[in-house]
Amino acid sequence: MSLRLLPVFVRALVRSLPTVAIIVVFNFFLLNMAPGDAADVLAAESGAATAETMAATRARLGLDLPLLDQFLNYVSGLLRLDLGFSAKFGVPVLEVILDRLPNTLLLMVTALVFALLVGILAGFLMALRAGSLLDRAISVVALFFYSIPSFWGALMLIVIFSVQLGWLPSSGYQTIGFEGSGLELALDMARYLVLPALSLSLFFIAIYARLTRASMLEVYGQDYVRTAVAKGLPPGRIALRHVLRNALVPVTTVAGIHFGILLGGAIVTETVFAWPGLGSLAFQAVFARDFAVLLGILLLSSVLVIAINIATDLLHAWLDPRVEVS
Amino acid sequence: MGTDGRALRRFLRNPSAWLGLLVMAAVLLMAATAGLFYPGDPQGMVAKPYLWPGQDPAFPLGTDNLGRDVTAGVFHGARVSLWIGVVSAAICLTIGTLVGAIGGYFGGWTDDLLTRLTEAVQTMPSFLFLIVLVAIFQPTLATITLGIGLVSWPTVARLVRAEFRRLRGQDFVLAARSLGFPHWRIIFQEILPNALPPLIVTTSVIVASAILTESALAFLGLGDPNVLSWGMMIGNGRAVIRTAWYLSAVPGALIVLTVLAVNLLGEALNDAANPRLGN
């Protein structure tokens, strides 16, 4: 990282502070709205509690303090990465979340990369043949993908590829009792990843295809492209080197913004495929009424979104030297 | 209003617009006649379970694992999707327009504050946020409708704010100011009508995503248990997906058709409003 990016990083960090503050306050408010408190959780955990021990637990945890003091305790807990205690799993919330996070990230990154590759390719072809039958056909397919609820797409993929054809597994993340390691294990897991990632990516394929098309058509109208044409450069080279490259900048911007939507999609997709990630954890937490876990996921994923936004800012500053002190 | 007339003609010449209108009309008709054709409780058991579509002419779309009529369910489910699409979008547009208009018009610290709020709401993954809301405040149709409106307004707020910032320095606004019009009148009667066209196109995206979001919640079993919706029907059919996939396929196809119609209308509106962007 060059020194030039440092002020960009600092500015993005400072800019995100109020957002973090609002989200933390809001999360605390929601935690207080939820029925039951940490003392109830611990009582349920131990299996026996009297009114006296409950009162003692509340005093020990500071739950009998005024709301403002409770809030300060909550914030200082967050600063020590203490997100509370999970009633369902009997361990700290952070532990449960970090245990599931890699699976969700694997699913999301696979889906996002696949959506970007297919979407950009489709958009590229559409822009190259704008107005042609191919352009129209792809745009109809894209609009269709754009309108499919991801869980329904997932179920229909299961019907086709698991039930009818029997090609791919319909749930889980690896074959139970699978023996083998390294490449064999990776291939086994990859088979389980195909359908969830595919169903999660359909919506984003549609978005990136349309965006790439629009963005490329806009770049085609610019002077430097006319210059390249006038110079007699081959059209394929112009399309790839001059147009697509510059048209990708807006696509990377939204890829950052889409992280939150992708996470929402992952929740539903994971429950359909029994994929052991944050989404199915959130789902389990709802039905176990484990609000500490639920709010922990909400808080942590918001922080993740902020981190992605900062990373996108840095990426832009790196791609485009004009983005500096503004 | 010559330009509006031209835009309307362009809209009506577009086959996408007609297709969208046709499907929307069909869904509206289903919702309107649900009580007429299927006056009973759509969750009531009326026939042998697992009748496939077309097997019994009395139940054209078949029956589910409990012998409930899929056709009746699909008709009643149309009501929920339309309700969510209209009411959630209205809530979202109201909040978004107010926040965006006030921030964009007044600027300064008001704008700073509202922008921070907008960013914070936009940062929280909205589907997760919605699950938390529904889990804490009970899943009823009212909380779900309100919840979807509450998580989706930032897009509208940003758009309206940008339009207000663009328009607030223009001559007609300065004229209104110099005439001593009150702020609310300048905001709602002078600037807002000029900020509407981009908002109309965004509305279609909001309606479509509201319908998709409600169906996802209902599918997960986090919808209103007393109101039959398409998402809930898919969720019920999921357990028997291997043997009776039509139970998931039929209501899902209706969601796709409805959302597709909304998107087609949105695209046609967009093309009509910005003709130069087309080919």
Image (cartoon, coloured by chain):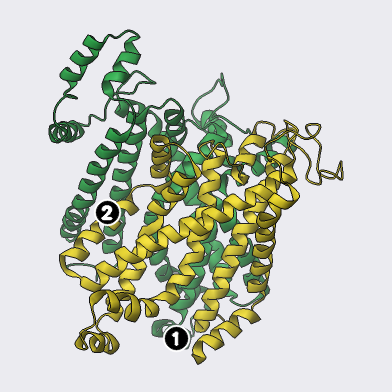
Q: Report, in whole angstroms, how far the alpha carbon at label 2 lies from the one at label 1.
A: 35 Å
Residue A273, how many percent across, how many down? 56, 34
Most distant residue in the bottom direction: B2
Q: Which mark is residue A310?
A: 2
Residue A120 visible here: no
Is residue A220 toward the left or the right of residue A74 in the image? right
* Residue A300 place in picture, x, y as percent: 31, 39
Chain in green, by letter, is A
Among numbered discs 2 and 1, the one appearing first in the sequence: 1
Residue A34 figure quarter: top left
Q: How many marks?
A: 2
What residue appears at the point 34 percent right and 47 percent down from the top-left corner?
A: B124
* Quadrant occupied by the C terminus of chain A: bottom left
Q: Which chain is yellow?
A: B
Of the pair B28 and A277, the residue shown nearer to us: B28
Question: For numbered disc 1, what is the local secondary structure?
Answer: helix
Q: Which mark is residue A226?
A: 1
Q: What subunit carries mark 2?
A: A
Please tell me which residue is depicted at 24% across the width and 60% down the height of the picture. Answer: B114
Q: Residue at x 67, y 75 (%)?
A: B15
Residue situated in front as seen by the camera: A259 or B6: B6
Which residue type carries mark 2? Ile
Position of residue A269 relative to residue A292, above or below, is below
- Residue appearing at x 54%, y 75% in the figure: B269
10 Å neighbourhood of mark 1: few (<14), some, or many (≥20)? few
Kind of residue indicated by mark 1: Arg
